[in-house]
Image: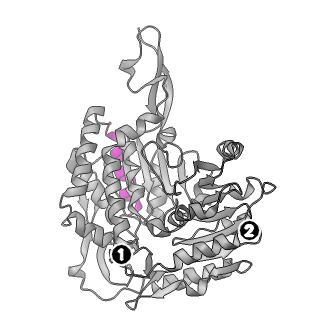
Amino acid sequence: MTSTGHEKTIPTADLAPIEALGTDGAYRTRNRDTIADTSGISLAELSIVPPLYVSRTLSAQRKSGPLAAAHRQQALAHAAQVFATADIAGLDFGTYVGLASRMSGLPIAAMRAGARGVADAVGSAFDAVRPARPVGAAFDWRDVHTGTGGAVWARRGQVFAVLAAGNGPGVHGLWPQALALGYRVAVRPSRREPLTAHRLVHALRHGGFRPADAVYLPTDHRGADEIIRAADLAMVYGGQDVARKYGHSPTVFVNGPGCAKVLITADRDWRDHLDIVVDSIANLGGMACVNATAVFFEGDPVPLAHAIADRLSAIEPLPAEDERAILPTRRIDEALAIANYLKATAMTTTPVLEADQVVADLGDGSAALRPAVHLLATPEADTLNVELAFPCVWVAPWSRDDGLKPLRHSLVVNAITHDDDLIDDLLAEPTVANVFRGNYPTHYTTPDIPHDGFLADFLMRGKGFISD
């Protein structure tokens, strides 16, 4: 059993087992990892499967064909209900939410809302993939007109792998779309928060999917590499290191740092939009890829930066399990490391809420991460794209001469502007995934708004078909 060295001693017998879920059912390994909360209290033991188990499991998945579409749709709807209401692996929904919040440091209210969002996403997975289907392609070859031919929307593979993140449950609302499309899915959970994926794979099996349709494979880095190798296609989450490792692979969909941004042009009064700016920074604990990392103003950004700081500094540091909590928590040594990294990164900036005040010791071995706000004299892209998993924002001036360069490589840009040409330019910029305009926080989502393009764009292709 591995250990970080910071856990508080709890008898092994009292730790909740989180077992791997393979094609033959649950599997409890000899190699297990202790999962602790952010105060260092051990909560669970996570089974860690070896690379050989990974390869055998994905091989078994490949040999199992997809369920009928109608069966998949019904099973997803049932699984969504099970996920949100049932006792699964000894945990009811409320207990699961509380433990996942303690493990990840995500405030419990945000965790609960995110988990309910996962259930909604699973239930609507079939509806979510439909907007991505080309209007000229049929979902089934039987729907293609005999004699004239046409196109069929076909899978690019059979097995889809997911290397999940642990900064929030929402990442598990996306990959069930692959099940809707007939893929078999292998999920490697984050060790930081492995409960959501475990609960979801159980729910899918209770809902009517076979064990081969969705497997849960906690594993180490060697096992993760084997998952990528053995799958046809994969989706990975992580930081710049993950983006560098997989970014050039045509079979891997990389969800790296979001570096979301807000731009307010001179024709709008930033005071009218301060609520949206602060919400973009601090909602979801500031931990999500869709939280705003940078805010630009076409004018003097100093008053805006101080107004943001005034709002953010009023947030009270609280334990993650407190219903009033807004800020994320981390083990105190991790929090200090984050603050030190921020301090080094921000050396050329003007602090408004500085790194030295970030760590709020909660007295139990954990710390809440207070917001940080720093002013830049110019929109330097290298600093503006430094993303940290708490409410941390860079504020900078922007001018028309700066153009789109500071706004590139963004999952979301919210342009608060009357300038239609600027919106055209942002939509035409290949490195900007989503463009919002006006009073929408950067974390705003609906089923009709793709996260980073439609996942189905990556999973599917159009094939020509004709039959006599």
Q: Quadrant of the N terminus?
A: bottom left
Residue 19 lies, in percent from the top left, at 27, 65
Q: In which quadrant of the rendered view does residue 163 lie?
A: bottom left
Tag on residue 300? 2
Tag on residue 264? none
Residue at position x 31%, y 40% in the image: 64
Q: Judging from the image, what secondary structure is the residue with disc 1 in?
A: loop
Q: What is the magenta range? A: 48-65
Q: Is residue 31 magenta?
A: no
Residue at position x 62%, y 79% in the image: 342
Cα distance between the residues tagged 1 and 2 = 34 Å
Q: How many marks?
A: 2
Residue 187 lies, in percent from the top left, at 38, 55
Q: Amino acid at mark 2?
A: Asp
Relative height, residue 459 to residue 400 (above, below): above
What coloring was used for the rendering? one colour
Residue 182 in view of the camera: no
Identify the main secondary structure in magenta. helix
Horizontal arrangement in the rendering, residue 61 relative to residue 74 (left or right): right
Residue at position x 52%, y 75% in the image: 312
What residue would you read off at disc 1? Answer: 324
* CA neighbours of label 1 inside 10 A, class few (<14), some (14 to 19), many (20+): some
Q: In which quadrant of the rendered view does residue 241 lie?
A: bottom right
Residue 74 lies, in percent from the top left, at 24, 39
Dot 1 or dot 2: first in sequence order is 2
Q: Is residue 57 magenta?
A: yes
